[in-house]
Image: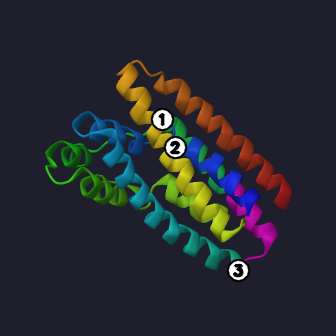
Amino acid sequence: MLSAFFISFGVIFVAELGDKSQLMALAFAARYKPWPVLLGITISTAFTHAISVGVGAVVGARLPTDTIAVLAGIAFLFFAAWTLRGDELTDEEAGQAERSTRNAVVAASVAFFLAELGDKTMLATITLATREGVVGTWLGSTLGMVAADALAIVVGRQLGQRLPERWIRIGASISFVVFGVLLILEGV
């Protein structure tokens, strides 16, 4: 369980760097106090990643481990390209963060749940759950994402627009390439 936790935490933390969820966290934190926003992110992430882990566990039980390793490696290379390309908030997502006058916890929970459906962190969690323990993957991926978004809130509030987003994307992409190549080599 600890191995699954640490792997999932690290991979999802890196995947979340420069992701649109971090941009949403910044947008919500600019409007609301940080703690209710972080609580909303945590609720949404726990729910979304529980679904992802469930899907990954079902897929993992049905495929041979070598096949899973190669497919996971290819998926991580895809995540590297996706991360390098960058992510931006759509007008609709930015509008949700701007117009919401409801409770910050509810607003952040709903917005983050909708934004994460089909996002790379959800897909990475599914991929990790095919190979790692379900509980450790769920806890690690949830806390990894919450930690990355908390970092965005803290750093974003302190530094404003001075974050080197390009370098963050490059570093995260390199990490995905390394994980992807290692998984492919393990499967072959």
Please state which of residues 71 and 97 is positioned toward the viewer in this rendering: 97
Within 10 Å of disc 3 (Cα), the crowding (few <14, some 14-19, many 20+) is few
For badge 1, the amino acid type reads Leu
Residue 151 disc label: 1
Q: Earlier in the sequence, mark 3 or mark 1?
A: 3
x and y percent of residue 96 in the render? 21, 49
Q: Earlier in the sequence, mark 2 or mark 3?
A: 3
User: Label 3: which residue?
Assistant: 61
Please state which of residues 77 and 50 is positioned toward the viewer in this rendering: 50
x and y percent of residue 31 in the render? 22, 37
For badge 2, the amino acid type reads Ala
Q: Are marks 2 and 3 in contact (CB under 8 Å)?
A: no
Q: Are marks 2 and 1 in contact (CB under 8 Å)?
A: yes
Whether residue 129 is in magenta: the answer is no
Overall secondary structure of the magenta section = helix
For the record, the magenta segment spans 62-73
Within 10 Å of disc 1 (Cα), the crowding (few <14, some 14-19, many 20+) is some
- For the rendered model, the colour scheme is rainbow
Spatial CA distance of label 2 from label 1 is 6 Å
